[in-house]
Structures are given as structure tokens and as C-alpha cells.
Amino acid sequence: MPDTPRPPNPDAFRAPTGTHDVLSPESSRWSGLIAAFARRAERFGYGLAITPVFEHLEVFRRVGAGTDVVRKEMYTFTDAGERELALRPEGTAPVVRAFVEHRPTPPWKAWYVAPHFRYERPQRGRYRQHHQLGVEAIGVDDPDLDVEVVDLAHGFFTDIGLSDVRLRLNSMGDEESRPAYRAALRSYLLDHADGLGGDFVERVEASPLRVLDSKRSDWREIIERAPQITEYLSDAAQNSFERVQRGLDALAIPYELDPRLVRGFDYYTGTTFEFTVEDLDAAQDAIGGGGRYDRLAEEMGGPAAPGIGFGIGIERLLLAADAQGVVGSRVQRPDAFVVDALGGLEAVRVVHELRSLGLRADRSYGGRSVKAQWRQADRSDARFGVMLGADEASRGAVAVKNLDTGDQTEVDRDEVAAWIETRLETPHDA
């Protein structure tokens, strides 16, 4: 007897939990953000880097085996060749891996836009597949470069109209200052661990700096009284951090010193920073951040190549934009809609000519009636309707109707594309 077919899973043809589709017109906001970021990054000398969606698992183990991202949230799998792989959970490690592999001449300055994957509880603006814009500058240890990277991000928020963005700034110290601070912090946290549970002790033992990043309300009082890393900075680390502050002051970029600020990965050294907005929930108010990672390339087997970068979450950024009423959809009106009463290939040629001149042009398909085509032209919100009729064709002309005013005129067939272009408020690139 054949097996009874299983009933279809009602969720099988829906986006998986923690993911979402982005369709027009919402997608036009995404393309606008990406274009604005690309323009600014390229003005700063950053070129686009595209890396694989998945990497060898070891690439991400380098970012911090004690972090929740690596221990609990990565999507990992073994392929048919028995290789351990992981979907990209963050943006820096893949770009550094690409630097180590291809050895571009430093300083190498790259920007990216990419999906990232983390198995975590979905929340408003936080998805298991989320998307980031980011930059990485690799090969130079110079606090002025830190200032440049912060300036790039800060100016991008201004470019898209976002206001009231707060910049929090800290230093994670250098190899001379971090061991002493880590030891002092670990000792303090363990001395005050009574009543905070086994998870607290486990996190302290794995990475005491990670505890400072916790949002646990029952840990907050202990964290607030913990030693501050700025009390342990070496002279070199302190001088570098002060230089960053002077650079930001020179550019009139406001910031707040936050000695509790640590980023979510163990590779950070030196300058760390985070951008927040009050329009989001207090516990999840960050829209982006980053910092310096001076040994990550070496840990991947590459040359000594200090780096700095940041990531900006697109979904989080759009939530902040919604709260402030900026970054609207950018779906633009068609310039022309061709209404075809002739049949044949004339409509194909006319639409092609309009588009070749750089105009946004559309038409109806499926042999619809002229009346139905005009209704579609009105729904499209096109500026002009181009009527291909037998009477006009006999005179080598077409009828062009201004769909805003209703005015109609006859235009020479060979001149219709140029005629429409000269009457548009904003010309297009061919």
C-alpha cells in the first residue's frame, strides 16, 4: 500500500521565523539608504567589498569564543565535503579574512552591505536574518583614522535626515593595559557574585568584559560599581584615546565618554563607539557601532594589520527613521505610460526608445482594451500618457496627454521621447 501523503505544512510557504520580505515601496527606502551610504563611503576612499554569506567556522571563532554570538547564536552546518561552515553572524571577520587572503596594499578601506544571521529571539527591528551597512579600514594604527571612521558614520546619519543621534565613546585599551584591567574586573565580579546565579559566574569566567555589556537588571548595580577600564589605560593607550577626542572636537562631533561601553566581540581594542537614538527602546537603542581590532588579522594567520570599522543595522536604522519621520519611500512616478491601440510591435519600439533615453516608461500587456489601458495609466501615476492610435500613426505622430492636467497634444513620432524629456522637472541620466 502506498504511503499516505502528509498534509502540507501551513508554514512551509511563509518566510521562516525571524526573517522578513522587503517589497516595493518599502524596498525603495533600502535602496535609498544603501545609495546614500555608498556615496559617502566612496567620498572617503572606501571601495565595495563583497564576501561569501558563509565562511569556515574558524573565521568566526576568532571573534570571540566566549561571546553568545559564537557560543549560542551562529547558524553552523557541515557540508558534503565534511567542512564546518557558518552563516555570517557579523561583518568584520569576513572582511578581515578577505584582507588576509588577498593582501591588498594597506591601508585597505572597504565598505559593505550584507545580510547577517543569528539565532536569537526575534524582536522589533531585530531579526535572525538582519542586514548591515559597514566599513573596515585595515593596515594603519592612527587615531586620526579612528576619527575618520566615526565621522563617516556620523555624517551618514546627517545625510539621511536623522537627528538626536548620540555617540558613546570608550577605549578598550591596548595589550599593556587590558590584562591588568581584566584581572581586576574578574576579581571584583567574582567577589560580588553571591546571589547572582551560576550564569553570572559562568560569564565572568568566560569573559569578564562581556558582563559589562549585559542588560540584566539584576546585575546592573554590580556592573555600575565595577572598575573602569580608563583607570588602567597605559600611557600610549591614553594618549591615543585623547587624540581621538581632540579630533572629534575639531570636527564638532559631540560625544559622551562611557567607560562601561564594550562591544559584543572579543577582538576589540582601543577606540570603541556606539550610536544610539532615544526614539528606540532604551534596552535596544543602538543603531550602529564599532571600534578598533588591532590583532584580528594576525589571529587569522595574516600580517600585523591593525584595523577599525563599524556596522549599522538597516532594520534598526529604519525604525529610528520612522520615529522621526525621515527616509520615506523613494518609488518615483513613471515618466510615460504607453497606451497601444495599434497592436503589433510599435508599442515595443516606443517603450524601448523612451527607456533608452533614460526615462521611466511602462505599458500594459495582455491585449487589454484601450479604456483599460488608460485606467492602468492613471493608476500608475505616470506624468504623460502616450497614445498609439491609427489616426496619429497615419500622420507619423502620437498623442501625448499630460495626466496631471488632462491637456493633450500631437507630437511627431520620432520626437516623442525628447519632447517628454524636455518637459520633466528633473531630467534623467541616459
Image (cartoon, helix red, strand yellow):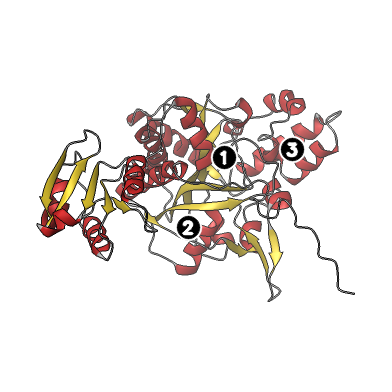
- Up-down relation of residue 2 to residue 365 (above or below): below
Indicate the secondary structure of the residue bearing disc 1. loop
Disc number at residue 287? none
Indicate the secondary structure of the residue bearing disc 3. helix
Q: Residue at x 45, y 25 (%)?
A: 324
Query: To which residue does mark 1 refer?
Result: 172
Front residue (pair 254, 30): 30
Q: Residue at x 50, y 61 (%)?
A: 51
Residue 114, image x and y in percent?
A: 50, 53
Q: Is 33 situated left or right of 233 in this image?
A: left
- State which tag comes first along the sequence, 2 or 3: 3
Give the residue type that dot 3 points to. Answer: Arg
**Distance in Å between CA atoms under marks 1 and 2:** 18 Å
Query: To which residue does mark 2 refer?
Result: 305
- Up-down relation of residue 325 to residue 263 (above or below): above
Instruction: Tell me where residue 86 sits by quadrant.
Output: bottom right
